[in-house]
């Protein structure tokens, strides 16, 4: 048995990097030029999680499909496995739910969950995992959802790929607040930073 293929309606792009202050100032300069904005831009910021990017589609508030990022255009249908994560709501709650919404998130394992998982594996004489990222990816891609359910997988949602018959706020920070309202976990460390100095802080 293999996973079915899912074609993403909007590509799931990978993130770019900025490692130095000059990289960040250059990024801010490009953003302001492209937006044709003179003043400071407000940036929505959150930690980058090292896990596995996924896309979940909800129809009338009910989880309909979940897929891995794959190559960014095509991923694997892992709906049955995502349903086993306690932090994935099977039904969204609240007001103003779109008829269809595709949300994007990162599946990961915390350091504590990783240590405990390896402790149990070692005690059972099984192979231990090398790092949390590979453990998360391997756990989500199990053909038996019961194995996925036994792993300490978490998810934070960070964005929206597509929405039908419904509106979303025009600022990313407000979109994250709306996702939280509907029962989707977002990073508790998400913040809005004002301008490049806020980004650097």
Image (cartoon, grey):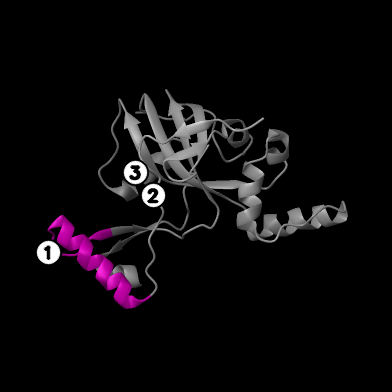
Q: Is residue 151 placed above or below 21 in the rendered structure? A: above
Residue under circle 3?
A: 175
Q: Nearer the viewer, residue 62 or 102?
A: 102
Marks 3 and 1, how far apart at CA: 24 Å
Label annotation for residue 13: 2
| Residue 37 forms part of the magenta stretch | yes
The N terminus is located in which quarter? top right
Give the structural element (helix, strand or loop) at label 3.
Answer: helix
- Residue 199 versus residue 73 in the image, above or below: below
Whether residue 71 sits left or right of residue 31 in the image: it is right
Q: How many marks?
A: 3
Give the mark toward the camera: 2 or 3.
2
At 62% from the left and 39% from the top, the residue drawn is: 85
Q: Is residue 52 above or below residue 36?
A: above
Question: Foreground residue, 93 or 13?
Answer: 13
Residue that label 1 marks = 38
Q: Earlier in the sequence, mark 2 or mark 3?
A: 2
Magenta: predominant secondary structure element? helix
Image coords of residue 57 (percent x, y): 45, 31
Q: Position of residue 123 (x, y in %)?
A: 87, 55
Q: Is residue 182 left or right of residue 29?
A: right
Q: Position of residue 190 (x, y in %)?
A: 42, 56
Q: Residue at x 17, y 58 (%)?
A: 34
Range of the magenta residues? Answer: 20-42
Q: In the figure, residue 4 lies in which quadrant? A: top right
Graded by Cα atoms within 10 Å as few (under 14), some (14 to 19) or many (20 or more), the crowding at tag 2 reads few
Q: Earlier in the sequence, mark 3 or mark 1?
A: 1
Q: Position of residue 161 (x, y in %)?
A: 37, 39
Q: Is residue 90 visible?
A: yes
Is residue 73 or residue 15 the one in the foreground? 73
């Amino acid at each position: 048995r293999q996973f079915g293929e899912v074609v993403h309606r909007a590509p799931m792009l990978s993130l770019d990097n900025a490692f130095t202050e000059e990289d960040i100032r250059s990024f801010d300069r490009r953003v302001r030029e492209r937006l044709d904005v003179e003043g400071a831009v407000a940036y929505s910021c959150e930690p980058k999680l090292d896990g596995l990017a996924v896309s979940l589609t909800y129809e009338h508030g009910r989880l309909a499909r979940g897929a891995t990022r794959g190559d960014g255009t095509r991923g694997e249908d892992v709906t049955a496995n995502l349903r086993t994560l306690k932090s994935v709501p099977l039904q969204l709650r609240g007001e103003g739910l779109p008829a269809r919404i595709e949300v994007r998130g990162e599946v990961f394992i915390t350091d504590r969950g990783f240590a405990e998982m390896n402790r149990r594996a070692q005690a059972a004489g099984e192979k231990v995992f090398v790092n949390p990222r590979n453990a998360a990816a391997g756990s989500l891609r199990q053909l038996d959802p019961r194995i996925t359910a036994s792993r300490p997988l978490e998810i934070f949602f960070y964005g929206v790929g597509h929405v039908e018959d419904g509106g979303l706020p025009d600022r990313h920070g407000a979109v994250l607040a709306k996702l939280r309202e509907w029962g989707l976990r977002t990073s508790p460390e998400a913040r809005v930073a004002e301008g490049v100095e806020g980004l650097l802080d």
